[in-house]
Structure formats: C-alpha cells, structure tokens
Image (cartoon, rainbow, N blue to C red):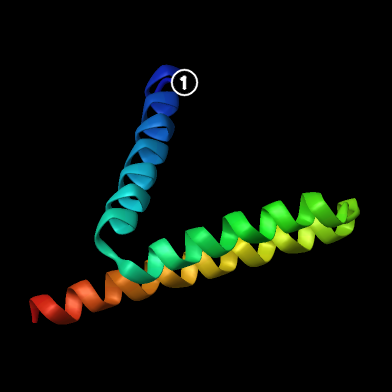
Amino acid sequence: MNPKQECKKLVNSFKYAIEGFISSFKTERNMKIHVLAMILVIALGFYLKINLIEWCIVIIIIALVITAELFNTAIETVVDMI
C-alpha cells in the first residue's frame, strides 16, 4: 500500500472515531454528563492553575472515563441487538 492510501485510511479512522463520539454524545445521557463534568474539570484546572503533571493526569483520566463510557455504550448496543 502506498503512503497516500495509508494516510487516507488513517484520516478515515479518525473521521469514524469522531462520528462515533458525536453519535454517542447525541444519544447517550451519561455521555452528556461526562462531557459536562470534563468541561467543569478543565475550567477548574485553569482556575486553580494546576501544573503540567496534574494536567497530564487530568487528561489521562478524562480519556479513560470517555473510553469506558464508549465501551459501555458499544456493549449495551450489542446486547440490545441480541
């Protein structure tokens, strides 16, 4: 596969991931709650002037929570299909 095709596959992967996140946000109440909490945590981080290490921890934890919610949504969708 040539580099142009690989780049296109990568771009499409990100496109589908973003579409999945947006779809989850539109349809799942808990995802809306998590995103609101994320916004509040980020705002508090700026207000409290947390340091770089603390920002890294906050970002990792936000990513873990969002990932867990997306996995939960996927599992619920599969179970509902069955």
Describe residue 23's horizontal placement relative to residue 53 as left or right. left
Q: Position of residue 18 (x, y in %)?
A: 38, 43
Q: Position of residue 57 (x, y in %)?
A: 77, 63
* Secondary element type, mark 1: helix
Q: Residue furthest front?
A: 47
Describe residue 3's horizontal placement relative to residue 30 as left or right. right
Residue labelled with disc 1: 3
Residue 24 placement: quadrant:
bottom left
Residue closer to the observer: 1 or 41: 41
Q: Residue furthest right?
A: 51
Q: Residue furthest left?
A: 82
Describe residue 11's horizontal placement relative to residue 60 as left or right. left
Q: Residue at x 33, y 48 (%)?
A: 22
Residue closer to the observer: 5 or 31: 31
Residue 54 placement: quadrant:
bottom right
Describe residue 50's horizontal placement relative to residue 29 as left or right. right
Residue closer to the observer: 22 or 32: 32
Residue 14 placement: quadrant:
top left
Where 71 sits versus 36, above or below? Answer: below
Q: Residue at x 72, y 62 (%)?
A: 58
Count how many numbered circles sit on residues in the image: 1
Q: Position of residue 55 (x, y in %)?
A: 79, 55
Q: Amino acid at mark 1?
A: Pro
* Quadrant of the rendering where the C terminus is positioned: bottom left
Q: Residue at x 54, y 69 (%)?
A: 65
Q: Residue at x 49, y 59 (%)?
A: 35
Where 51 sits versus 18, above or below? Answer: below
Where 48 sits versus 1, above or below? Answer: below
Q: Residues within 10 Å of mark 1 (few under 14, many from 20)?
A: few
* Quadrant of the rendering where the N terminus is positioned: top left
